Amino acid sequence: MQNNYDVLIIGGGVAGLMAGIELSKNGKKVVILEKESVVGGQCRTEILKTKDETYRFDYGGHRFITNNEVLLSFVEEILGDDLLIANRSSVILHQNKIYEYPLNIKNLFKVAPFKLLLGAFIDTLKIIFKFVKPDNSSFKSWIISRFGKTLYENFFGPYTKKLWGVEPENLSADWAGQRISLLDLKDVVKKLLFKNKKTARTYAKSYRYPKYGFGGLPIKMANKFESLGGEIFTNEGVEKFLYNQDKIEAVYTKDKIFYANDIISTMPLNEMSNMLGFESNLKFRSLRFLCIGLNIEDFSPYTWQYVSDYDLLPTRIQEPKRRSVSMSPNGKSSIMLEIPCNKNDEIWNMKEEKLLEIVKNDLKKLNFDIEDKIVDYFSFITEHAYTLMDIDYTKKRDDAFEYLNKFKNLTMAGRQGTFRYIFLDTAMETGLMAAHRVLDEKSYTKEKIYNHRNEKTVIETKSVV
């Protein structure tokens, strides 16, 4: 079976769907190939049904926060009354103590042990009087030179090693520079001692959230795309390409062949490179989610609880109803535990029963006993959860793009496709930019798309919400 299109989009996540909608609006014949049975990519919502009750769980901790008013208007139009405004409440769990997130001086002095406070104070003096200078050679050096050894050893180091599965000295400092809003301990002190209404987007309290989980967004985007004449093929993973020196000629799935003038791909950059003849050596970190329905009204007051202790399996505990009450049945709640892993490792392959037992014991150590409160549970995995930003990832990424750029009719987009640790709105923007490039708008170069919002400062800066 052969199919001919103006544009073929690989991946039915929000970036691919955004590109498809824009191209279809401009009269292009567009097809989207999605390897899964439903659209959404990592922006999906899984459902746990027990009798007549429904619990919903997102793939991760999505929030819609943007400074792009056009994009916000689009999402508001797509979701209508299902788009809520939620408020975030987050804490850090560390050695059986609860620390407010972001830092709060009253809570810090109330909760932190004297040794930690003393160490942080001495580190602050060293930084203020410039005994320690900024060091961007690795994640570890970036943190220690800005926050001190005490906070690194208690919070940043153990959590980071657990999250990424590698030693922090082997991680790039880029991740810290783009994800940690406070620049150093001097900045912390200023925020603690002086009221500052300028809140970085990483810490934004308010955000937009779909009533029934983020999976509702790509489903409605898909409906919009199809209403404009676009086609979506699910369960159609790309198996190979026919290509020459500078062009992709055809895209093969299991039993179909697709031809298109232009290709937009949100396939993970390493996989796309490999299929087109280049070994990139880029890697992703996976996540396994353990989702538990609970026969209690509330698990905690918090949306997210970061688990910094290295000896405990989860990195984060989410309570979905804190985002929308519709995520759990009336009078009940649920939790979702995020557990980092690598494909086919022990955690990835572990039976759900064993995983639950480990997690229940870890929760008991955190003073949460859910033994007699569990209604039901299940787990699911996302293979490409995080781009692994190791020390030399920039060169490997640049090399991959240098190779792929020779294919004139190929544009990469999305979080996995551009190998970027970006947020939902930025992923959607890359899809929109890729569409404009195909529409021959000269200002939208591949380089601009691949490095969109790639400043060496915090990615999240402000929100129109």
Image: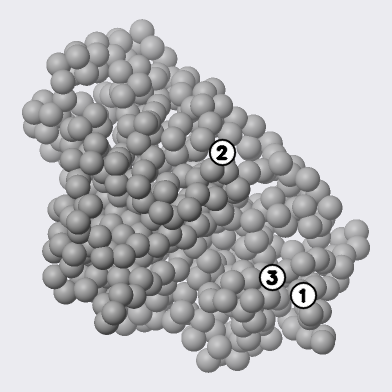
- The kind of secondary structure element at disc 3 is loop
Please name the residue that numbered disc 3 is placed on. Answer: 237
Q: Give the crowd class for mark 2: few <14, some 14-19, many >=20 residues within 10 Å.
A: many
x, y percent for residue 165: 51, 35
- Between the C-alphas of marks 1 and 2, the distance is 33 Å
Label 1 neighbourhood size at 10 Å, few (<14), some (14-19), many (20+)? few
Residue drawn at the location 69% of the way across and 50% of the way down: 270
| Picture mark count | 3
Identify the residue at image location x=83%, y=73%.
Answer: 250
Q: Residue type at mark 3?
A: Gly
- Find numbered disc 2 in the image and state the secondary structure of the residue it sits on: loop
| Viewer-nearest of discs 1 and 2 | 1
Q: How far separated are the C-alphas under marks 3 and 2?
A: 26 Å
**Residue 430 lies in what quarter of the image?**
bottom right
Dot 1 or dot 2: first in sequence order is: 1
User: Can residue 87 be seen at all in this image of the molecule?
Assistant: no
Amino acid type, residue under disc 1 in the picture: Lys
* 332, above or below 231, in the image: above
Q: Quadrant of residue 155?
A: top left
Residue 280: x and y in percent read 74, 44
Question: Which residue is disc 2 drawn over?
Answer: 389
Residue matched to label 1: 254
Residues marked 3 and 1 touching at CB (< 8 Å): yes
Residue 313 appears at what percent x and percent y? 38, 40
